[in-house]
């Protein structure tokens, strides 16, 4: 029996065709763009800062505030927009340019905000409520527009899965973990933004109801004052009419009273004259009696 060398005599198996290793430089362009664009964290930070800025402005409006606190809130908004606002919000900033001017904030041609303490203080001192209202209006519009950008980024965030002919490389696996973490951060940011917007909507509703109640109370107070003034005017007219009637009655009774008084005065004079005559007669009789007595 002839020995057969198992290594030389056996037919070497043909290895299956292994996939070519995908180098990091040959990754799909979409996956590379998703790995390098940190839009999720920047937009989430932008929204969170907007929510804080809105609360600060509302607290200032409720407490009256001062120029220094307003300038600080406006500068925080300026820094947040310039650092974290996506370019898609430039159209909102351009539309808000006249509104922001009331708060002492300028909008550049590239959408960047510019402000200084002097302009902010001057705007607040000129019209405090107008400056605070302009700031709150701009924050609300930016928050609405930024909230609308979240679904679009969620759809564009995950990278396309690799085809079945390619084995996942360590770089691609690491990229998938990063995208998953980014998606989780985006979901948390979306939930926080939605909760903040819901809280703001509830606060807006409560403030609106309180304002409506104050308006109703003011109208009731004004109506009560108007009724009081009308009642007072009516009482004054009635008093004036009573006085006029009394004066007219006294004027009509004056001639008859004068005639009666004259007649009484005449009767009194006649009585006085009669008493005087009787006294003179009695005196004459007394004198006559005295003379007769002396003559006797």
Image: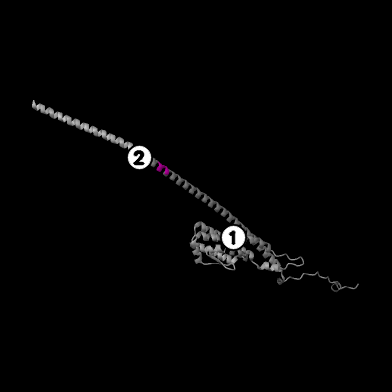
Q: Position of residue 108 (x, y in %)?
A: 57, 68
**Residue lying at 40% horizontally and 43% vertically, measured from the top left:** 240
Secondary structure at badge 2 equals helix
In the rendered image, which quarter is residue 285 located in?
top left
Q: Which mark is residue 141?
A: 1
Please name the residue that numbered disc 2 is placed on: 251
Q: Which residues are magenta?
A: 237-241
Q: Is residue 204 visible?
A: yes
Asked whether the residues under the numbered discs 1 and 2 touch, taking CB atoms below 8 Å apart as contact, a structural biologist would say: no
Left or right side of 22 for 274:
left
Q: Position of residue 32 (x, y in %)?
A: 69, 68
Residue 88 lies, with reference to residue 248, above or below; the image says: below
User: Colour mode?
Assistant: one colour
Q: How many marks?
A: 2
In the rendered image, which quarter is residue 179 located in?
bottom right
Q: Earlier in the sequence, mark 1 or mark 2?
A: 1
- The C terminus is located in which quarter? top left
Q: Residues within 10 Å of mark 1 (few under 14, many from 20)?
A: some
């Amino acid at each position: 029996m002839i020995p057969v060398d198992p290594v030389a005599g056996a037919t070497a198996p043909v290895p299956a065709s292994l996939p070519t290793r995908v180098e990091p430089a040959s990754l799909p362009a979409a996956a590379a763009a998703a790995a390098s664009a940190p839009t999720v964290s920047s937009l989430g930070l932008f929204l969170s800062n907007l929510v804080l800025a809105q609360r600060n402005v509302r607290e200032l409006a409720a407490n009256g505030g001062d120029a220094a606190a307003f300038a600080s809130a406006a500068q925080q908004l300026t820094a947040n927009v310039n650092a974290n606002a996506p370019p898609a919000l430039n159209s909102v900033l351009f539309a808000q340019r006249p509104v922001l001017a009331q708060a002492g904030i300028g909008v550049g041609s590239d959408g960047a905000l510019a402000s200084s303490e002097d302009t902010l203080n001057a705007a607040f001192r000129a019209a405090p409520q107008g400056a605070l209202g302009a700031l709150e209006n701009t924050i609300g519009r930016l928050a609405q527009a930024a909230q609308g950008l979240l679904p679009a980024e969620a759809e564009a965030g995950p990278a396309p899965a690799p085809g079945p002919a390619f084995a996942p490389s360590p770089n691609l696996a690491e990229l998938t973990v990063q995208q998953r973490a980014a998606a989780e951060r985006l979901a948390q940011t979306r939930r926080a933004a939605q909760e903040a917007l819901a809280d703001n909507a509830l606060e807006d509703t409560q403030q609106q109801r309180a304002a409506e109640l104050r308006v109703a109370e003011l109208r009731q107070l004004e109506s009560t004052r108007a009724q009081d003034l009308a009642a007072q005017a009516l009482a004054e007219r009635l008093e004036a009419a009573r006085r006029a009637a009394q004066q007219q009655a006294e004027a009509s009774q004056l001639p008859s009273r004068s005639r009666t008084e004259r007649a009484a005065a005449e009767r009194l004079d006649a009585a006085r004259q009669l008493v005087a005559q009787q006294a003179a007669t009695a005196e004459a009789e007394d004198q006559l009696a005295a003379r007769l007595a002396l003559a006797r």
